[in-house]
Image (cartoon, rainbow, N blue to C red):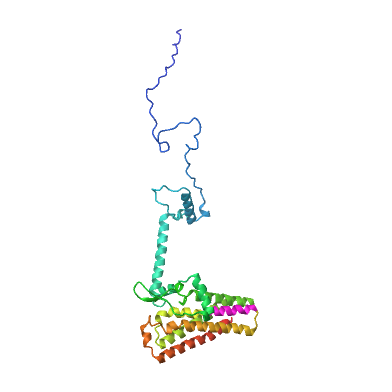
Amino acid sequence: MSSPPPLRHPVPTHPAYIPEPPSTPGSPNGYQRFSSSPGPAQQQAAPPQQQHVPAYMTSPFQHSQQQQQQHSLHPLPPHQPSFVPQPDFAAWGVNDATAQFGMQLGSSAVAAGQEYVQKNFGGIIPLSSVKHHFNVSNSYVIHKLKLVVFPWTHKSWSRRVHRSEQGQTEYQDPRDDINSPDLYIPLMAFVTYILISAFHSGLQSRFHPKILGESASSALAVVIVDFLFVYIGCYLLNVQASKQAVDIVAYSGYKFVGVIFTILSSYLYLSRALYYVIFFYFFFANGLFLLRSLRSLVLPDPVLNSSTATISPGLRRRRISFLLIEAACQFAYMLFLVRV
């Protein structure tokens, strides 16, 4: 029996050249080997983890706000464009194409509605003039209310004018002229009168929802009657008031300020005589306010209307008498409105 061959161990060999590993974005000079964990200076900032929020707890706009906050915490490099947040409709299961189509459809509907209103009601209701009458400021509202309640202290009642870009002479906006009429105060006073009427009925235990409609109808009827009286009177007196119809509506609504103060004075448990003193005060205040304010409409400044210089003395007296009648009519209007 032959003996097994002797065992021979392999002789280790060392290569003459070891290639370097390729460079990576995280290690531009090749791989780095550490015997222990790297220090703080060698650790790279981990990318921010986005927290998953269920779709039923957020809206697309809230999701976009979260993305904006993440980008604000980790600003982009200077060479990249700034992030513009967009609603994430995917959180609600709506794809981007459907969302964009819906937004375009809504924009088209709004544009079509504005065009329809301007085309059908632009000749009846001058929208540009309405915007002009709502251009007010807090300072204007405070001083205008003071002017309506205390017209005796006001000196200059002439309205200010300016040159438009087309070279035409126009009245300044209410925020720049205390004597310019506005629609903000009359509208707020109109709504406040309706609410006070309902509140007064509730104090007397006779409130009903129909009182809101009845008060609104009565107040609107008074405004319409006052507007028609002034507008027809200007037409008969050959006053060009067609372009200032919104001014007449505004002047017709200032009476609600005195009516509201008169109704509020009844809650102070004053005597009946003192109550009527307050009523007559606001009547005379409103009458003087209209008498001086409507003068710019019935007897316009020659700077704005050259035909004013040709008014005969008789026609001028008739126009002044018309202003006095309009001021006296405020007694009947306000007496009707304070009886809530």
Q: Residue at x 53, y 82 (%)?
A: 285
Q: Is residue 239 left or right of residue 275?
A: left
Q: Is residue 93 above or below residue 12?
A: below
Q: Most extreme residue toward the left, as rendered?
A: 166
Q: Most extreme residue toward the top, as rendered?
A: 1
Q: Is residue 58 above or below residue 200?
A: above
Residue 105 in percent (x, y) is at 40, 63
Q: Residue at x 62, y 80 (%)?
A: 266
Q: Number of labelled discs?
A: 0
**Quarter of the rendering occupied by the C terminus:** bottom right
Magenta residues span 255-268
Looking at the picture, tell me which residue is in the foreground, 184 or 202. 184
Residue 251 in percent (x, y) is at 48, 80
Q: Is residue 292 above or below residue 141?
A: below
Residue 222 in percent (x, y) is at 51, 82
- Magenta stretch: helix, strand or loop mostly: helix
Please tell me whether residue 22 belongs to the stretch shown in magenta: no
Looking at the picture, tell me which residue is in the foreground, 8 or 275. 275
Residue 291 visible in the picture: yes
Residue 226 visible in the picture: no
Residue 126 in percent (x, y) is at 41, 75
Looking at the picture, tell me which residue is in the foreground, 217 or 247. 247
Q: Residue at x 43, y 88 (%)?
A: 319
Please tell me whether residue 258 belongs to the stretch shown in magenta: yes
Q: Most extreme residue toward the bottom, as rendered?
A: 314
